[in-house]
Image (tube, coloured by chain):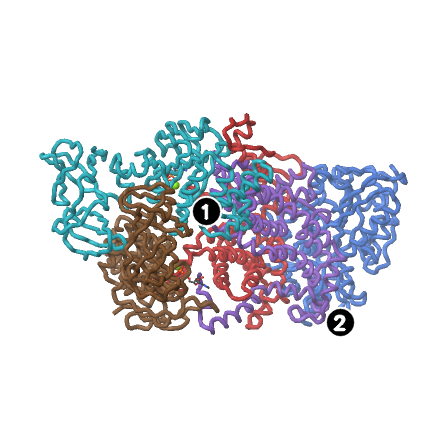
Chain colours: A brown, B cyan, C red, D purple, E blue
Amino acid sequence: MSGVTLNKVVKRYGNVQVIHGVDLKIEDGEFCVFVGPSGCGKSTLMRMVAGLEETTEGRIEIGDRDVTRMDPAERGVAMVFQTYALYPHMTVEENMGFGLKMTGHPKAEIKSKVAEASRILKLDPFLARKPAALSGGQRQRVAIGRAIVRGPEVFLFDEPLSNLDAELRVEMRVEIARLHNDIGATMIYVTHDQVEAMTLADKIVVLRLGRIEQVGAPLDLYRDPDNKFVAGFIGSPAMNFLDAVVTADGKVEVPALKTSVAVPVTLPAAGTKVILGIRPEHVDVTEGDALSIELTEALGGVSYDYIQADTGERLIVEERGDHRAAPGTRVSLSFDPGRAYLFDADTEARIR
Amino acid sequence: MSGVTLNKVVKRYGNVQVIHGVDLKIEDGEFCVFVGPSGCGKSTLMRMVAGLEETTEGRIEIGDRDVTRMDPAERGVAMVFQTYALYPHMTVEENMGFGLKMTGHPKAEIKSKVAEASRILKLDPFLARKPAALSGGQRQRVAIGRAIVRGPEVFLFDEPLSNLDAELRVEMRVEIARLHNDIGATMIYVTHDQVEAMTLADKIVVLRLGRIEQVGAPLDLYRDPDNKFVAGFIGSPAMNFLDAVVTADGKVEVPALKTSVAVPVTLPAAGTKVILGIRPEHVDVTEGDALSIELTEALGGVSYDYIQADTGERLIVEERGDHRAAPGTRVSLSFDPGRAYLFDADTEARIR
Amino acid sequence: MTYATVPDTHPPAPRGWYKRNQIAVTPFLFLAPAILFFAVYVIIPIGQSFWISLHEWDGLGEATWVGTANYERLLGIGEQNMDRKFETSFWNNIKWLILYLLAIPAGLFIALFLNQTVRGIRVYKSLFFFPFVISQVVVGLVFSWFYLPREGLLNALIGLFGFGPVNILGDPSLATYGIIAAGLWPQTAYCMILYLTGLNAVDPEQVEAARLDGAKGWRMLWYVILPQLKPATFIAFVVTIIGALRSFDLISVMTNGGPFGSTRVLSFYMFEESLSEFGFRMGYGAAIAVILFFIMLAFIIYFLWSMYQDERGGR
Amino acid sequence: MFPTPIEKRPRSAQLSYQAFLPLALILWLLPLIAVANFSIKPEADFVNGNYWGMPSSFEMFSNYGRVFFESNMPRYLLNSLFITVPTVIGAVALSAMAGFALGVYRFKGNLFIFFMFIAGNFVPFQILMVPVRDLTIDLNLYDTKTGLILFHIAFQTGFCTLFMRNFIRALPFPLIEAARVEGVAEWRIFWYVVLPLMKPALAALAVLIFTFIWNDYFWAVVLTQGPGAQPVTAGITEFNSQFRAAYHLMSAGSIVAALPPVAMFFLMQKHFIAGLTLGAVK
Amino acid sequence: GSHGAALSGDLKIISDMSNPAPRAVMEGMVADFQEMHPDLDIELTIVDREAWKTQIRNALGANPPDVVNWYAANRMLPYVNAGLFADVSDLWAEPEFEALASTKGAMTIDGAQWGVPYTYYQWGVYYRKDIFDELGLSEPTTWDEEKANCEAILASGRKCYTIGTKFLWTAGGWFDYLNSRTHGYDFHMALARGEVPWTDDRVRQTFANWRELIDMGAFIDDHQTYSWQEALPFMINGEAAAYLMGNFAVAAFRDGGLTDDQLDFYQFPKIADVDYAEDAPTDTFHIASGAQNMDAAKEFLRFVVSVDNQTKINGGDALGQLPVNANAEIGDDKFLQEGFDMLSNNASGGIMQFFDRDFPAEMASVGMEGLQEFMVFPDNLDDILARLEDARARIYE
Ligand SMILES: Nc1ncnc2c1ncn2[C@@H]1O[C@H](COP(=O)(O)OP(=O)(O)OP(=O)(O)O)[C@@H](O)[C@H]1O
Ligand SMILES: Nc1ncnc2c1ncn2[C@@H]1O[C@H](COP(=O)(O)OP(=O)(O)OP(=O)(O)O)[C@@H](O)[C@H]1O
Ligand SMILES: [Mg+2]
Ligand SMILES: [Mg+2]
């Protein structure tokens, strides 16, 4: 068993607390993605699992072992860094074999393990090259290969793809997904990228200011966010938020849209201020005079309308097919009230 | 008039020719985007317009002036660099006014021009700061401001947004579009990013190995690519390409799909090898047994199926709504043959 | 000097020659003073030294052409013996070259020791750098007192452990080592500062990756840190070699070449032959300098070659 | 960071490190401490063989007073200052310009000229001795500060140019291109864009050159004589003969001679390290 | 001549009289001369004596000073040959200079005179009278007495002789005496002129004599690390009993705290039956041939050798050395009197200028290095002599 369990884990730098008692259970073989805004503590948390940062309080277990105070090398984890952190003076082969060499494995074993990993990652033609002679994607693969070779129980990835260009990012993302399918090890993955989080994760952990906001499967978070923060964070383009107020007749009045909608949730008292959230892909543009189109971006298969309400609020609407409305056009918007979300204006908690 | 005209423009570094006689006319006030794979010469071409690289052969005109041998300073162009290239020791205000100061403009004039630009770009609160105290997006705005202040005829942008994170990139992209609307100057823009190219451009220039592959409006390129390279380059995810062969009955047989389709174009002789292209958004997954789903990525509003044919060829299919097919499922694919493209297997030219 | 190129559609005003060729001409204007100085004081004198080395000249009167006689005498070509002083100087130079390199590991060691972030560490770093800032003349004096045969601190210290007094600078078999040790002191400080700056630039993620890979202590140092310190090592190597071949001040202050010439090195010998109290053999001295120059040339070429390799990747 | 930051090690390791640090420093600086000790001793201590013990009486003021008032030391110090400061300014200015030309422009012979500077800098300078001495005499600059300054500037330019050029190379080139596109004349790019960014390098070089020149002995002996122009390194030999084996005075003199570069280093050390990092060990 | 005529302009003097007593003398001389010629602008530079030995050449190049210090005999030969010293034979033709006749030879090259002496001094053995008294010893006159004395001193836990050979020339003094006492002045000078091979048995005999002392342990240890000044404390502290040195050392002894009761002097004893030859080096002033103010320079030289000045500067409270002008009074200092007496009456063999002035420069340099080595490693003698012989063959060719 090699799941990872965090138990009331706390990290302090001097007096500054950056991780506030995180509890988390990652199952054996699970692909867990940490997301959250910059500075929320994603990297710190991962590095605590790796042993690169000391854990101030709490316990970290890998499998059944308490690793809280262990050396990084003894934890059975491997890490892939954002900058790859390849040793520039070693060849690809030496890079991959370095960990085994340090732990005193016989040469023949190292060779066969490296060969195996390079086969999986299609790195054979580059084994004798130095990292400087590789492209970004190849370097990234070497970094992963270096992790694989050591046969760790847990893989850690800290924004492994953010230094690659868009095309390669897609390619490597698919490769990492395949890798997880193939070797089935537990993986923890930090990313900024919506798409990576949604597509790779078995479980997404949304962090904010050193605390967990919500944990769940990607589509669960997408469909059923616990609060405005998670709702706004998951999904791209981000959910539109509009100020609204509960009316006496059990509806929600949205000034920006110049209409009221009947959202099927247990509404608070009339007059309560709420926030209505609706995703760009769930809104349709209809003829009307409520709002005006500011700008339209057509990407071929899909296009985005940037719409400004007379209240000054802005929305994005996604349209399928290839059309391009002229800026300045007046329109109305319609959507299925069942796909709208309501949040408390103060606590930002979801109203269900 | 300040369009830009390139006339048989050639660039050689020593013996290596990197631009092979490019002819291009950019109209006054047009937003022209250069795209192409890395190393194809986008930056080189733009820097030749700026005068930062010498033009080996050919002529470059801005408006009516032949600028081919002019110093950068005299061409009336302004450039925004990928790394912003702000002067770190000067405040925002000094950065923006530096060019004018150096060319001997009176102080009052500089001040008013800088004020105007910073108003447009909402930089007023930061005028007294040094670049180090600004966020990435703000720095990018200062770089643009510096370009605006000089009132150039032509703006040049070399991947101006690639150092920003995803969210900011979207924001700044919209801002650049607004800027172009507002000041209406000629702009040349280099990018790797599909979305930027599609949304910003009046005209996209697709480059490959120092040659122009196709020039046209974004949706024209999307709908009507001249060759396989352009078809594959424009649109995201990229178009799927499948080996096919013309049959005697005027259809096209696609082994990967285990079917033949009647593509409404002038077909070459039966037996000719062709390539069939179809965009992920134009394919539907139906029940069947022709191919198998390898992997599914659900992003919430949209999901992608990675599908492998028995021939080994791979396809991506975009599906709306949130579903997630289990890997391994056998399926068939259907699409409107009118949306398919055919390319010559050898020349890769479009068959129309 | 200001001129206005308002970017507008007016045809540009006719421009001066300089303005038209600004980018091509500027580098030479900027280089001119440096090149002038350098040529007059360095490049041309090197040639002149070659020329002088082919003459016999007392530095006062007329020079007489003697061809390669000076070199033949130095190297013992023909029936004469090799110049003994030259031989001693040469081997001493070799000792300097080899032993001086100890400054590199020593500097690295101290740099590693000081590469921490405790309170006041900056002051410590500066104080450790101290010896480098001090003139070699003073270092030489200090060490010659340190070595004094009777009153020297060194003898006081080894006396504590029951060892008899040694007269390091008076013993021809030890004197050179004693001077080298004195030279190592500031040189180690120099290497230390180079390594400290080098350690600053070590990629922390690589260190972390290596920690995950199970590398620790010496093995971390050897396999991961040292390769990253290569640029620092390179510079340290270069400055140490230069320092070793130039070792003049220390010898002149500490032993003046003695006892009976046992601490001479080539640079000192050439000074002695051409400009010292009894030295009136400019040609001979120049010949020694030329030989020293050729030894150095090996290092210069090595250095330039490495730089050239680096440059080929650059813009 | 390597080695492992001490604050991540056990408390005991931290304490012993903190304790060992001053100890190591004392050992390292032992020769200097001894000299400092010498310089405040009365002459009697040396007669009585009390070389290394505590001073029997505290004679700092009288010893240093004699250095300043009974010898040419003050003149030598001033000479050193008047030699060192113009040299630093000259060498830094020349090499900043040369470094700019070599670092920014692509032209034929760029690398050749650059390598010439490097090679010249690594030449054993004794080879220059005779011709430079003759040249200086011919220029009527023998035994003048100007003669020394001119030579030092020329010789240091090699090293400084290497340093400056590498530093400028490490600057983002688009900064220069941006200025060019903005219509800034080349020399103004140097003055307004490049020079301000080179401040750390200028500071680091200034400190290095200051120490090099201040401590120069060889050329001082070759190109000057007497307190009219000689710097303190050469002057100290006169001083030493004047006071023969008076260790207390010689020590005081040595310390006085060593102090200015030390002060310079302490004042500039922040920039010094920053500049070195970028220039030498990039 | 311009006797008494008003002098004006600049007069640049570089002097190597840098030790405390000579320094004061030099400054005093310039002050006196200044007083005599108030319109003259005198610029005096005093340079370290050791450093001056290398700097003089640079100084005499372009833009030279008017007057410089140097040494007589062979030591001035290169500068005379190079035409850097002005011919001052006209001065020597003046009647006042007849009183300098005894030093004329040392100032003469190619029949002309190239400078004037300002002082000379005897060499001899300075010793601690109090220690001799304590041990019941008396001044030795023969080699055997010398050795016997030394035995006694050694037995008392002291060294016989202090010496500092770091700058080599002190060993030259020992050789001058040992060689001339063993084989006579003429042989010594023949050796200096390169007419005798260093491997000659007679030379070996000289070294054999020297070795007797070395093997006894007569010299202080580690002398190769000390300059002559650094060797002084050994005698001042009573760790060594004697110092073979020039008379200029007396001032230093006195500075070091030795009283005239403790300090005494004897002539280097007889070894073989040859006439005594004595080292009495002459220090000199010269005019650079490029001097700007030749009149003033010559006047200064006249002043230097004048009777009054000679009396004044060589007095016991000044240099404490011997005047070069026969009409000058010799200081009433006991060492001066003894020395003058010795040189006048007991140096019938001849006057030597000193090793580094009698031997050509290059030979002197190689030779003194060999002497120093011999003093530390007497067993290396054969090798040393072979080396010196090698040098002799080349240098005098
Ligand atoms: N050594 C340190 N000392 C003090 N605070 C630190 C230190 N390292 C990190 N922090 C703080 O801890 C918080 C979490 O940092 P962390 O790097 O984990 O964020 P992150 O979520 O990975 O951000 P990003 O997405 O930008 O990588 C930040 O507020 C950061 O300022
Ligand atoms: N100084 C140079 N010498 C030789 N070849 C060069 C030089 N600069 C660029 N090249 C070559 O010119 C070609 C075009 O380079 P350019 O920088 O214009 O590509 P790009 O399209 O901008 O690529 P990217 O998207 O990576 O920025 C490349 O193949 C490059 O290797
Ligand atoms: Mg992070
Ligand atoms: Mg580019």
Question: On the rendered image, what quadrant is the C terminus of chain B found in?
Answer: top left
Residue lying farthest to the left in this orientation: B249
Depicted D21 relative to depicted B164: above or below:
below
- Front residue of C220/A10: it is A10
Residue displayed at 22% across by 48% down: B316
Please give the label number shown on residue E136: 2
Instruction: Give the quarter the ligand 4 occupies.
Output: top left
Q: Describe residue A316's horizontal placement relative to residue B132 as left or right.
A: left
Q: Secondary structure at mark 2?
A: loop
Q: Secondary structure at mark 1?
A: helix
Q: Is residue B138 visible?
A: yes
Q: Describe residue E217's horizontal placement relative to residue E114 as left or right.
A: left
The local crowd at label 2, few if under 14, some if 14 to 19, many if 20 or more residues have their Cα within 10 Å, is few
Residue displayed at 36% across by 45% down: A330
Q: Is residue C292 visible?
A: no
Mark 2 vs mark 1, foreground winner is 1
Mark 1 belongs to which subunit?
A: B
How far, Cα to Cα, is label 2 from label 1? Answer: 100 Å
The three-letter code of the residue at mark 2 reads Gly
Q: Would you name the residue on which mark 1 appears?
A: B140
- Give a yes or no on whether discs 2 and 1 share a subunit: no
Quadrant of residue E97 within the rendered picture: top right
Mark 2 belongs to which subunit?
A: E
Quadrant of residue C69 within the rendered picture: top right
The local crowd at label 1, few if under 14, some if 14 to 19, many if 20 or more residues have their Cα within 10 Å, is many
Question: Which x, y percent locates residue A156?
Answer: 32, 61
Depicted D273 relative to depicted C287: above or below:
below
Question: Which x, y percent locates residue A46?
Answer: 36, 64
Q: Describe residue C47's horizontal placement relative to residue E42 as left or right.
A: left
- Front residue of E390/B161: it is B161
Quadrant of residue B5 within the rendered picture: top left
The three-letter code of the residue at mark 1 reads Gln
